[in-house]
Image: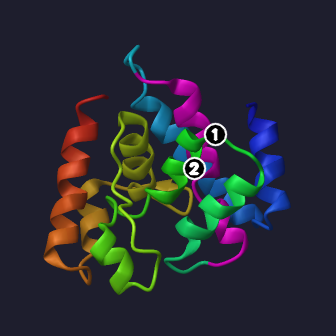
Amino acid sequence: MREEDCIDLLRMAGCSAGVIAHCRAVRDLALTYASDPLIDRGLVEVGALLHDIGRGVTHDIRHAEVGGEICRSFGLDEAVIAIVERHIGAGLTADECSLLSLLPRDCMPRTAEEKIVAHADNLVKGTRVITLDERLLHAIALPRRQRRRIYRLGLEVELFR
């Protein structure tokens, strides 16, 4: 899928110019981690561009779940849908989803592509790339377990760079 196709989908889903700019910034950063030949660069690019498609409907925690539903309605590949649904922080367990009034399903990033997009999203605030330390400062209100998960994901994905 071409970038223009992804941008068209974001617009059809109601995403603002700011959300689209953020998605492009996440894509640009994510691709810096996708140089290993075992990583599907095309999947990373499409997943990063569409990761916040649910923000056309809501800007709360439900945007990942809503984004997955939007992607399904567009007939997108399950690998892209998984990136969209699993990009929050460093993922959410089924129990955490349930506590947040989301569908009680495992939303932990599993594949390298899912992890790369989640990490890149963690490091892009608006369109500005921040450090992992800055991200952790922004996440200070999160439970320690989730902050630790963000840190570990960062350490793991930074090995790809």
Q: Residues within 10 Å of mark 1 (few under 14, many from 20)?
A: few
Spot occupied by residue 147 in the image (x, y as percentages of width and height):
20, 68
Q: Is residue 81 above or below residue 103?
A: above
Which quarter of the figure is the N terminus placed in?
top right
Which residue is situated farthest in the front direction here? 104
Quadrant where the image shows the C terminus: top left
Q: Which residues are magenta?
A: 39-58
* Residue located beneath label 2 in the image: 81
Kind of element beneath mark 1: loop
In the image, is 121 to the left or to the right of 19?
left
Q: Is residue 4 magenta?
A: no
Q: Reply yes or no: does residue 50 show up in magenta.
A: yes
For residue 114, side relative to residue 141 (left or right) = right
Which circle marks residue 115 in the picture? none
- Does residue 115 appear left or right of residue 48 in this picture? left
Where 80 falls versus 10 (above or below)? above
Percent from the top left, x then y, of residue 18? 69, 64
In the rendered image, the vertical position of residue 75 relative to residue 65, given as above or below? above
**Is residue 34 something that shows in the picture?**
yes
The image quadrant of residue 96 is bottom left
Q: Residue at x 69, y 43 (%)?
A: 76
Which picture quadrant has residue 43?
top right
Our reading of the magenta stretch's main secondary structure is helix
What residue does disc 1 label? Answer: 77
Residue type indicated by callout 2: Ile
Contact? badges 2 and 1 (CB < 8 Å): yes
Report x, y in % for residue 60: 54, 81
Q: Residue drawn at (52%, 25%), measured in percent from left and top?
A: 41
Q: Amino acid at mark 1?
A: Asp
